């Protein structure tokens, strides 16, 4: 097998390992969180999670396909300037989409019908923004040729999210959980770069 083939196989292995650990962490959270949170808080958590997930689609603005389609060929061609310009442009658009989606999240969860309260809605909007930026960072790692970082980032993201959320929840309820998860996402973002 050639060096390029070995490197490709290694990258695929890292990404798959990251997917596997991510899936296990989320499965564990799906089993444990309902029991730990109780019916009322878990219902609120599920509502918030659904809103954040729906708005994630808006925050990406279809850029995942553009990242893979345009960044990888530029990188392979060795055009560092064009790769950097395109990456920063995608980041700018993705950040604007993430901010817009977080503001919609805040407005949506603040309406009186949801019975969540403004503090929880604000904590959720901050979490949503950090999560969208986290996902954007993760999706840029593959076309930039950093498959190992992608797998590690995915594993750390799942484990840290569940751990930070639970610790914050124990200390200060749902608001504390989402604030702690926001801080964990911010730390991961800084570590990725």
Image: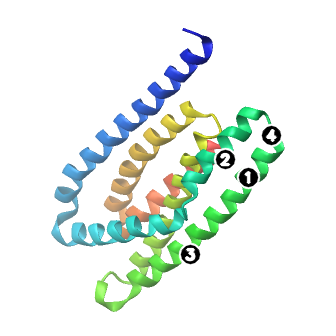
- Examine the image and state in which quarter residue 95 appears: bottom right
Residue 93, compared with residue 78, is above or below; it is below
Check disc 1 and report the residue beneath it.
86
Q: Which residue is mark 4?
A: 80
Q: In this view of the protein, can residue 186 be seen by the observer?
A: no
Lower position in the chain sequence, tag 1 or tag 3: 1
**Sequence-wise, which precedes: disc 2 or disc 3?**
2
Q: Is residue 27 above or below residue 76?
A: below
Q: Is residue 142 left or right of residue 48?
A: right
What residue would you read off at disc 2? Answer: 70
> Neighbour class for label 4 at 10 Å: few (<14), some, many (≥20)?
few
Say which element carries label 2: helix
Q: Which residue sits at x=39%, y=81%?
A: 109
Residue name at image x 29 percent, y 85 percent? 115
Label whose residue precedes the other's in the sequence (2 or 4): 2
Q: How far separated are the C-alphas under marks 2 and 3?
A: 25 Å
Q: Residue at x 29, y 89 (%)?
A: 113
Looking at the image, tell me whether mark 2 or mark 1 is earlier in sequence order.
Answer: 2
């Amino acid at each position: 097998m050639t060096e390029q083939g070995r490197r490709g196989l290694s990258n695929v292995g890292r990404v798959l390992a990251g997917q596997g650990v991510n899936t296990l962490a989320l499965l564990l959270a799906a089993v444990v969180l309902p029991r730990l949170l109780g019916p009322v808080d878990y219902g609120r958590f599920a509502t918030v999670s659904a809103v954040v997930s729906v708005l994630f689609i808006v925050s990406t603005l279809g850029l995942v396909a553009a990242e893979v389609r345009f960044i990888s060929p530029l990188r392979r061609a060795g055009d560092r300037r064009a790769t950097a310009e395109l990456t920063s442009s995608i980041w700018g658009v993705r950040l604007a989409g993430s901010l817009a989606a977080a503001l919609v999240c805040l407005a949506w969860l603040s309406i009186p019908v949801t019975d969540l309260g403004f503090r929880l809605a604000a904590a959720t909007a901050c979490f949503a923004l950090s999560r969208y930026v986290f996902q954007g960072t993760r999706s840029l790692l593959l076309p930039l040729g950093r498959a190992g970082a992608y797998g590690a980032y995915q594993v750390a993201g799942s484990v840290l999210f569940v751990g930070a959320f639970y610790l914050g929840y124990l200390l200060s309820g749902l608001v504390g959980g989402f604030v702690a998860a926001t801080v964990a996402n911010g730390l991961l973002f800084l570590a990725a770069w």
